[in-house]
Image (cartoon, helix red, strand yellow):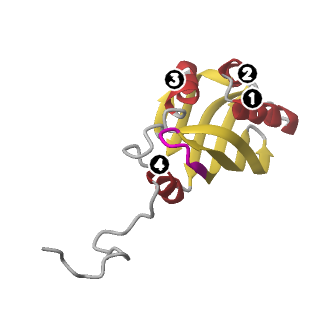
Amino acid sequence: MANTLSRAHVEAFYRAYASRDIEQIAPFLDDEVEWTISGPVDVLPFCGTRRGRAAVLDLVERRIPEVIRVHGFTPDLLLVDGDRVSTLVRLAGYHQRDGRAISYRVANFLRFRDGRVIENLSLMDSFDAVEQVLGHPLRPPGAQDPDDDGVVAI
């Protein structure tokens, strides 16, 4: 296979990405990279799709830190198959607004060309992430508040 990646190259990419330093990350990104983070954009505005190196670097440098100051991005599992990479990662950080600790898992599916990322799809445990960012558990529509004793104050 002409476009086979080495595990060492992928690990170097993840070290650069974990550093959150755009100067280290940029060389690993294709000019036309497509970067998607699946999740609720209304609560986690860094979710969605970005196209192009500049947009992805802006995401890492500005958009994600507006919500979470990431201090850890540790791959638990890593699979390299030709030009494709799958990882299960533990993200750890602090909520930007109040400093609460936040930690959740993310599955990443990447495709490389000539040693550069051309596509990323990140699937986070968005339910867990949203609860942590909001600072409280989510309740399904119509569910009773566990603190609500049913008594209405007048």
Mark 4 vs 1, N-terminal side: 1
Where is residue 122? Give x, y as percent: 58, 45
Residue at 63 percent across and 38 percent down: it is 70
| Callout 2 secondary element | helix
The question of residue 44 being in magenta is answered with no
Location of mark 3 (residue): 55
Find residue 104 and report its horizontal and vertical position in percent.
61, 54
Disc 3 residue type (three-letter):
Ala
CB atoms of marks 3 and 4 within 8 Å:
no
For label 3, the crowd category at 10 Å Cα-Cα, with few meaning under 14, some 14 to 19 and many 20 or more, is some
* Residue lying farthest to the bottom in this orientation: 150
The quadrant of the rendering that contains the C terminus is bottom left
Q: How many C-alpha atoms fall within 10 Å of the one at disc 2: few (<14), some, or many (≥20)?
A: some
In this orientation, which residue lies closer to the viewer: 97 or 14?
Answer: 97
How far apart in space, not on screen, are marks 2 and 4 (Cα)? Answer: 26 Å
> Tag on residue 24?
2
Q: What amino acid is found at the position of numbered circle 1 in the picture?
A: Ala
Q: Which mark is residue 39?
A: 4
Which residue type does callout 4 highlight?
Gly
Q: Which mark is residue 16?
A: 1
Label whose residue precedes the other's in the sequence (3 or 2): 2
How many numbered discs, if any?
4
Taking 100 as reference, is 36 above or below it? above
Magenta span? 96-102
Quote the CA–CA distance across marks 4 and 1: 23 Å
- 87 shown above or below 143: above
